[in-house]
Amino acid sequence: MSIELGNMPKLGFGLMRLPEKAGVIDHEQVCRMVDKYMKAGMNYFDTAYVYHGGKSEVAAREALVKRYPRDSFMLATKLPAWEMRQKSDSDRLFNEQCERAGVDYFDFYLLHSIEDGSNYDTYEKYDCFKWGLDKKKEGKIKHFGFSYHGSPELLVEILNKHPEVEFVQIQLNYLDRTNPVVRSQELYNILQERNIPIIVMEPVRGGMLADLGPETEAKFKERQPDKSVASWALRFVGSLPGVMTILSGMSSEEQMDDNISTFTDFEPVSEDELKIINEVTEEILSMPQIGCTSCKYCCDGCPKKISIPDVFRTVNTLRRYPDDWRSKNFYAGLIQRSGKASDCIACGQCERVCPQHLPIIELLKEASEILDN
């Protein structure tokens, strides 16, 4: 069954950064966001086994599956290599996901976070590509692919070995085009050459491209005063050929409203606007920033319960606005409920799961010098 591109909404609802209240997912707000999204004629929802500490798939069940006919939406989730110890774990995890989400099939199913090394080795060791095809034959999966954080060289190797893959999900945004770690432009080119549909993750780079500072944002506002800064990032990837769906991990109704507005009567980026985007890209790259996307994969296994993305966000804000006292106040409140940067014991758990391959241990040392003294 090939993917009907015309049936895919350009905006996908990513369920990785759902709104929370008192530390738990805000179910009522999520329901309102789902309703707005569906009312706008969009229907692609992306979750995963690990999102929100295992609660994201459950949130999808409560806010979506129980409230809408099954054939009115598309639901995607992912197999986590790091939870696998034997071949039978594929079925065990899949069955658990079906129970969590309250469904008996998934429209899109991905091998989660393939990269050079452990995750890809695990999927090959347990024959997960063939397993995915078998699940398709059983009708438990409609479309099979993977999310990718590895090198262009490995991507070519995988696609040559597994031509059955129907789509690939990659990190793609205007800032990461030349990122020597992400190499998103190279990944995009490979998929385009092979006519493989692309699902985009991190189009706003974990919110970073929605908050650029007054001087940088002024370049966008001068051209489009009524449009959000985030809309420029979404329109950039939405204008690229071969992009099937763009995931946005929306955390509020305001973000939902803005994104729906961007993709209603969608306007591709013009040549003049692309010049502005390129100027902004150069300006951002000239500032020293930690390239964290706030996926929070590093948080669950941290023995010291350090909220690593929030620490890095504080450092980035201080670098951009060194005289802003609010960042220090934010950090003071943060360490009342989580570990300090200096609490890091260098166990390396965080670095093993970081999709951005950040040297987190060293970065926490630097953060500690800025924040804990």
Image (cartoon, helix red, strand yellow):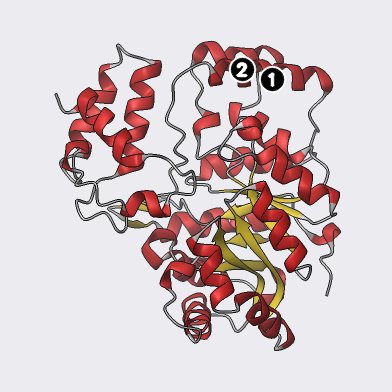
Q: Are marks 1 and 2 in contact (CB under 8 Å)?
A: yes
Type of the residue with mark 1: Asn
Residue 334 higher or lower than 83, as above or below: above
Real-space Cα separation, disc 1 to disc 2, in angstroms: 6 Å
Tag 2: residue type?
A: Glu
Q: Give the quadrant of residue 320.
A: top left
Q: In this view of the protein, can residue 21 be seen by the observer? A: yes
- The percent position of residue 11, horizontal first and vertical second, equals 68, 49
Quadrant into which the C terminus falls: top left
**Nearer to the camera, 264 or 105:** 105
Q: Pinpoint residue 192: horizontal percent, then vertical percent.
A: 82, 48
User: Horizontal and vertical percent for residue 333?
Assistant: 19, 35
Reply above or below: 75 against 240: below
Question: At 71% across and 15% down in the image, what residue appears?
Answer: 223
Q: Which residue is the site of mark 2?
A: 282
Q: What is the quadrant of the N terminus in the image? A: bottom right
Which residue bears the numbered disc 1?
278
Disc 1 on helix, strand or loop?
Answer: helix
